[in-house]
Amino acid sequence: MAYIDQFFQVLVSAGASDLHMAQGSPPKIRQHGGMVPIRPEPLSEEEMAYMMSEISGPERWAKYLELGDLDFAYQMDASSRFRCNYLKQAHGFGCVFRIIPTKLMTLEQLGIPEVVKEFGRLRGGIVLVTGPTGSGKSTTLAALIDFINTNYARHIVTIEEPIEFVHPNKRSIITQREVPEHAPSFPVALKAALREDADIILVGEMRDLETISLALTAAETGMLVFGTLHTNNARKTVDRLIDVFPADQQSQVRTMLSNSLRGVVAQVLMRRVDKPGRKAINEILIVNPAASAIIREGATQKLQDVLVGGKAEGMQFMDDAIFEALKSGIVGPEESFMKATDKNRFRPFLPQDAKVH
């Protein structure tokens, strides 16, 4: 048993999501959104170095000492797997671990709207799952890939940094590639996927111009591409994809995106008030002819009208979804106010002493 496993066992038994460790501070876990210390003593340099190097191995440890950052996955036992991020910080060594469930949850279990399954039935185009860090994007995408794997015979290539959810082959064949273990970068792995007879490509993070450009090209050639972005809603997602390109290319990119974008699933996690835990709240854009024309014209401010008017097609505007969860007593007024775009809509629900001016 590795030395750090004792901390992971506390994380697992507490039902927490993340373990935070920093030299000079006590270890803490993120439980239902809040930070909780798990011992009073701060972590020393020696203790940090010992446990971090033990699970990373000598090659990765040397790389971390040289570069100051490292990402990889670690499996403690058959039911506990972790995404590991090493960093250097003001007081020395630091690391953050996110628990990755080894048992894949279904879209139903996650409470994701049924219409999201329609994206798994597509044969081409690009679908983006977006949201801030820690909003459950990877979990939702893993559930969608598992839905495809269970119901359809496809070749699915995932490109991740690191591999989080491990998918067994069911009806589909799943090829999981890790950056930089199996390919030096996302663009290199994406180019290779174009030659690997893939039906579906999952891009773990679309963070730069080359990756986004290649993902759009793959979608245009008839593949179904899933990707993630750190954007909060459908409008910001479309703007981010276009803005990453130089100004003289943006008109062409808008045309490409209007033809290939099939949908955006934006997600936030909100603390529940009806029971312990957090609830995924989604904005869902299904790109219909109206949305496609808006993207081509560059008038993304009009996408909200499409979202609000597209309820019959399964579309969902984020503020409306938050409002429904608030009315149903699932989430509280303060967090609804904080996560909403239109604050005034939620201000009347705040307790009198908590009203924000």
Image (cartoon, helix red, strand yellow):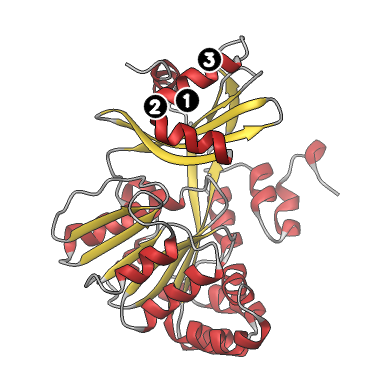
Judge whether residue 262 can be spotted in this image: no
Judge whether residue 99 can be spotted in this image: yes
Alpha-carbon neighbours of circle 1 within 10 Å: few (<14), some, or many (≥20)? some
Alpha-carbon neighbours of circle 2 within 10 Å: few (<14), some, or many (≥20)? some
Q: In this view, does 47 lie to the left or right of 226?
A: right
At 46% across and 20% down in the image, what residue appears? 51
- Callout 2, which amino acid? Ile
Alpha-carbon neighbours of circle 3 within 10 Å: few (<14), some, or many (≥20)? few
Q: Residue 55 carries which label?
A: 2
> Residue 306 in the image: x percent, y percent?
55, 79
| In the image, residue 31 above or below residue 197 | above
User: Which residue occupies the foreground of this view, 356 or 124?
Assistant: 124
User: Which residue occupies the foreground of this view, 53 or 341?
Assistant: 53
Distance of label 2 from label 3 (alpha carbons):
13 Å
| In the image, residue 120 above or below residue 138 | below
Q: In this view, does 327 lie to the left or right of 353?
A: left
> Residue 304 in the image: x percent, y percent?
61, 74
- Callout 1, which amino acid? Met
Q: Closer to the N terminus: mark 2 or mark 3?
A: 3
At 60% across and 30% down in the image, what residue appears? 34
Q: Which mark is residue 96?
A: none
Q: Name the residue under label 1.
A: 52
User: Which residue occupies the foreground of this view, 308 or 209?
Assistant: 209
Quarter where residue 331 is shown = top right
- Could you say whether the residue bearing mark 1 is in a helix, strand or loop? helix
| In the image, residue 137 above or below residue 302 | above
Q: Is residue 108 left or right of residue 205?
A: left
Q: Do the residues labelled 1 and 2 touch (CB within 8 Å)?
A: yes
Q: Do the residues labelled 2 and 3 touch (CB within 8 Å)?
A: no
Q: Name the residue under label 3.
A: 47
